[in-house]
Image: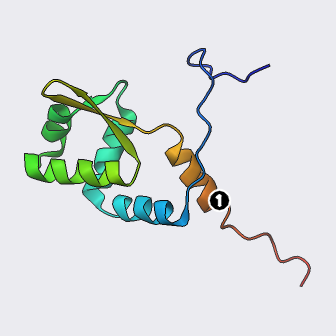
Amino acid sequence: MIATNPRNSETPPKAPRLTRARRTAILKALADPRRFELLERIAKASCPLGCSQALAALEISPATLSHHVKELETAGLIEIERAGKFHNLKLRPGVLKALAEALQALETVSCASR
């Protein structure tokens, strides 16, 4: 039996394995407070977030938004859906889960044997 996501009938995406370089790129991209805020807005949107919506919410210039979007896309955190002259932003499935798993793996086990 295949496990399914309770929100829909699709199989949940498997978290991709992140290379050291990819983890570093993701963490560098998220180190900027505006990019992190943009990623939060994309994640909280019920459907892909339009660039015009992001621009209005963040109160930044179009050039700055473009830069932040490019950094998040290059890091592999988001996907851009192009529909004519409009661009919609959405999270890349499984990447945040893979990052969380990689960070969780850094925790050490208790040193009870000392």
Residue at image position (41%, 49%) is 76
- Camera-side residue of 39 and 20: 20
Left or right: where does residue 19 sit relative to residue 26? right
Q: Position of residue 112 (x, y in %)?
A: 88, 76
The one of 54 and 70 positioned closer to us in this rendering = 70
Q: Amino acid at mark 1?
A: Gln
| Direction from residue 57 to residue 29 in the image, left or right | right
Report the side of 71 relative to 78 (left or right).
Answer: left
The residue shown at (14%, 33%) is 52
Give percent across and percent down for residue 27.
43, 62
Question: To which quarter of the image does residue 15 belong?
Answer: top right
**Residue at the disc numbered 1:** 104
SS assignment at label 1: helix
Outermost bottom residue: 114
Q: Residue furthest top?
A: 9
What's the residue at 30%, 62% (across, down)? Answer: 32
Quadrant for the N terminus in the image: top right
**In the figure, 75 relative to 80: above or below?**
below
Between residue 43 and residue 4, name the one nearer to us: 4
Identify the residue at the far right of this view. Answer: 113
In percent of width and height, residue 87 lies at 21, 31
